[in-house]
Image (tube, helix red, strand yellow):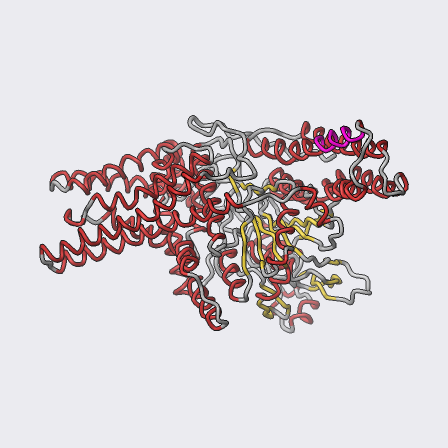
Amino acid sequence: MTTHSTISPARKRQFGSERRTDSLPTIHARPSDRRITFGRLAIIATVLFWIAYVVSTIIRQFIDSGTNFRFTMEAVSYLVVVTFLSFSALMYLVARQGALQRFRSHVRVPRAELDRHFSTHTGSMTVLVPSYAEEPQVVRQTLWSAALQEYPSLRVVLLLDDPPFPTDPAVATRLDETRALAVGISAALAEPAARFAAAQREFPTLSPSSWVDPITVRDLANHYIWAAVWLEQMAATEQNTDHVDRFFVDEVLLGLAAEFQLIAEALSAAASENTAPPRERMVELYQRLVSTFTAEVETFERKLYASVSHEANKAMNLNSYIGLMGGNYRHEQTPDGVVLRPVDESLFGDLRVPDSEYLLTLDADSLLLRDYCLRLVYLLEQPENSRVAVTQTPYSSFRGAGTRIERLAGATTDLQHILHQGMSFFGATFWVGANAVIRKHALEDIVEVEQVGGFEIRRYVQDRTVIEDTESSIDLGTHGWTLVNYPERLSYSATPPDFGSLIVQRRRWANGGLLILPKLWRQMAERKRQGERTPRLELALRLNYMSSIAWASFGLVFLLAYPYDSRLLSPLVLFAALPYFLAMASDLRSTGYKASDVLRIYGFNLILLPVNLAGVLKSLQQAITGKKIPFARTPKVKNHTAAPVWYIVAPYLIVAFSLFTLWRDIVEQNWGNAAFAAFNAILASWAILSYIGIVNSIVDVWVGATNWLFVEKPSRSSRSAVTLTPEALDWRAVLYHGHPGAMLPRGSRDELLSVDEHETTAGQVAA
């Protein structure tokens, strides 16, 4: 059994952090008729109140008061803002209603049916875990959750994207620990895998006839007891410093052990009654043990090879490996590094990459429950789902968060889980990149091939934007494929623990949706050409998913900054928004949070307004310049991630401007605007104190103000490496490139690969 990596210190728990540590049930609670009825009434009320506002306020003001140019422009702009915000609220209610319908109709497939289906299953699966600069313990837990999937013919590949030759000793140590994970897990699985494979081979000799002896049943029960004890012993050696560690121990390891123990008790009860399950069921139970503990775990580093793409994003990390699948390759040393040359399957190769029928992409900070693969592949292999390319369970948050902001970010994650489930009800599913099971054949339909430097580069997952999964969802739809969310909670992913790391995540989420809209129009045109009509609700949900951050951010800026005429204000606007907030409060309660978290989320979104605006503006920048935006990986560190100065100062400016607006509106007796300004000032101030903190604000501003004063001193080797002298002439490089200008001096490639050229982050790690 492997030992875990170096233990990092646990983050100190904040006052007001989450006390609940129990995970939400895997199967959603069946919604009551009352809750579904309320959802329908909320949709109707939102539409009616919006219509009533347009008629009673906007149109009436035009008729009764006459108009001038300024009032007309104010009325039009205010109506546009209110309409877009009301549309987003309406889409929340619609998606939520679809989720409730799915939760009510979902019937879980019995375990015996899964085992029967996979008893003769031959389709293989490769789990791809892209990783960059992750803590080894985080990656280790992810790999174990994948390796313990109860799936036959499973390969788990860690796509390690760190610079392969780091010069920093701490970084090198972390990289060595990460590289050793696959070997350690394989070694740990060797004993149970050999034991259960031997037991499976012996079973036909112990029970040659169709009748199963009770003694044989007890033997199988003992094997399940042994497996449960093995898992319990492993759990006892695990570190338990935070809520993610507890989830890994309780749900991944002990959850599987409890299932095995239960099966052992059932088999022992059958043997005590001098009876036995059918022989076919016994074979399936042996196969379950073998499948659980048999997995190939490997590591692949694309940056060791000059013939694959080194573009700095997660999509190309995945594409580089997927493009090699099904091939046999020989290493060829060149002045640029090792090149992979395809060779015939019958010949000896230095690297053989097996092909798979299914791929499972899994972020390095995500964990899967034990039957994730079985249930999702079973769904794909039903006849009616033959054109489903991607299925997933939108990830849920780990409970027991140690900081207030992680708790609230987790709440929004769990709300998004519900919305994504509802979008599947209307055929508007989007691939959420944290985890997904994909038909590899579907990816072959959307692959783009180009030649770069004489080597073939294949793009299966688009990397044009930093939300690569969203763009690929549209590509798959254009080629006639669909996507489905499985209506259970089977995957979990970490949420940012502080404001600095949250900025990186949310700015990335806000970037790219507008750039993908033209592809959506092309998909609609293609479906229309094939005689298929795009349902209006599907289109509305997709538009809202891809664009709502843009219009909500700009709309909120208008509402905060511009003193609209008091004649445009009406309680009907609040009534139109009320069903949305009441539904969200109900959803928060159903997922174990407080109804009052609605107000906290509102304040939370206020201080994230500059972050969302920055992401939207980056999209517009890319649309104008055509230059890709660097992929920013969310930091997963135990200590504080410093935020850029602007994102710290901007929330304080929002509070200050709201207070100024409050004073101005009181003087002008514009009571509606005054109340709105006071509401924003109070909730934004609370969000700053709770989720950023005064001390952290001072530290981050100081780091941002002084960081430019410090420049890393280049080493002697790095200074001399870039100097090309006649003595440094490499004849191999000249013969390979054809001219000396294309070459790098000897040794400089290793220098370059030791530098972190990968994802940029918004902040630095402060002690």
In magenta, the rendered stretch is 261-271
Residue 205 visible in the picture: yes
Residue lying at the far left in this picture: please name it.
Answer: 65
Q: Residue at x 48, y 44 (%)?
A: 417
Is residue 326 or residue 293 the one in the foreground?
293
Residue 401: percent from the left, percent from the top?
49, 32
Residue 735: percent from the left, percent from the top?
69, 71
Is residue 153 or residue 450 the one in the foreground?
153
Residue 732 position by quadrant = bottom right
Q: Is residue 265 magenta?
A: yes
Q: Residue at x 68, y 64 (%)?
A: 335
Q: Is residue 682 above or below residue 483?
A: above
Is residue 701 or residue 281 the one in the foreground?
281
Residue 449: percent from the left, percent from the top?
59, 69
Is residue 712 or residue 146 the one in the foreground?
146
Q: How many marks?
A: 0
Q: Is residue 476 magenta?
A: no
Left or right for 369, reference 427: right
Q: Quadrant of the N terminus?
A: top right
Q: What kind of secondary structure does the magenta stretch mostly adopt?
A: helix
Q: Is residue 629 above or below residue 15?
A: below
Q: Residue at x 72, y 49 (%)?
A: 118
Q: Is residue 459 above or below residue 5?
A: below
Q: Is residue 761 above or below residue 325?
A: above
Residue 632: percent from the left, percent from the top?
49, 50
Residue 483 position by quadrant = bottom right
